[in-house]
Amino acid sequence: MTALWELWWVWIAAAIGLAIIEVLAPGFLFLGFAIGAAITGLLVALSAAGSMTLPVLLLVFSGLSLVAWLVLRRSFKGPKGQVKTFDHDINDG
């Protein structure tokens, strides 16, 4: 019997679940994990990681998630040194 972490569709299902959580709780944290799970699922599907043990697969997943999160953070951050300020209050007439 094949362990769950060796099935590609389990990683893709986890990626979809994490992407749904990202929609409900935005902040690009879960999106990085979703991207990491999707790429890990593709690696398992291509049999590049099919013979890996669970600790090695989790290491690959965490490394890919960290890289995805760093790329998202860099691509979606504001200009350097710029602080968001508000000139008026929403409750002012």
Image: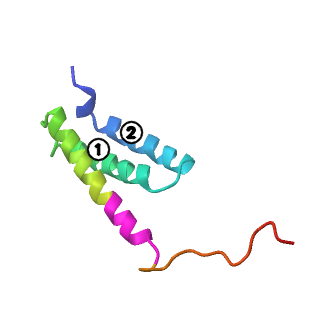
Q: Which mark is residue 41?
A: 1
Q: Residue furthest right?
A: 93
Quarter occupied by the N terminus: top left
Say if 56 sits above or below 65 in the image. Answer: above
Quarter occupied by the C terminus: bottom right
How far across and how far down the image is residue 4, in percent? 28, 28
Q: Which mark is residue 58?
A: none
| Image-based side of 41 in relation to 18, left or right | left
How far across and how far down the image is residue 56, in percent? 15, 40
Q: Residue furthest top?
A: 1
What residue is at 38 percent from the left and 48 percent from the top? 34
Residue 46 appears in the rendering: no
Is residue 73 rendered magenta in the image?
yes
| Image-based side of 82 in relation to 51, left or right | right
The kind of residue tagged 1 is Gly
Crowding around mark 2 (Cα neighbors within 10 Å: few <14, some 14 to 19, many 20+) is some
The kind of residue tagged 2 is Ala
How far across and how far down the image is residue 28, in percent? 44, 56
- Circle 2 residue: 14
What residue is at 37 percent from the left and 54 percent from the top? 32
Magenta region, residue range: 69-78
Crowding around mark 1 (Cα neighbors within 10 Å: few <14, some 14 to 19, many 20+) is many
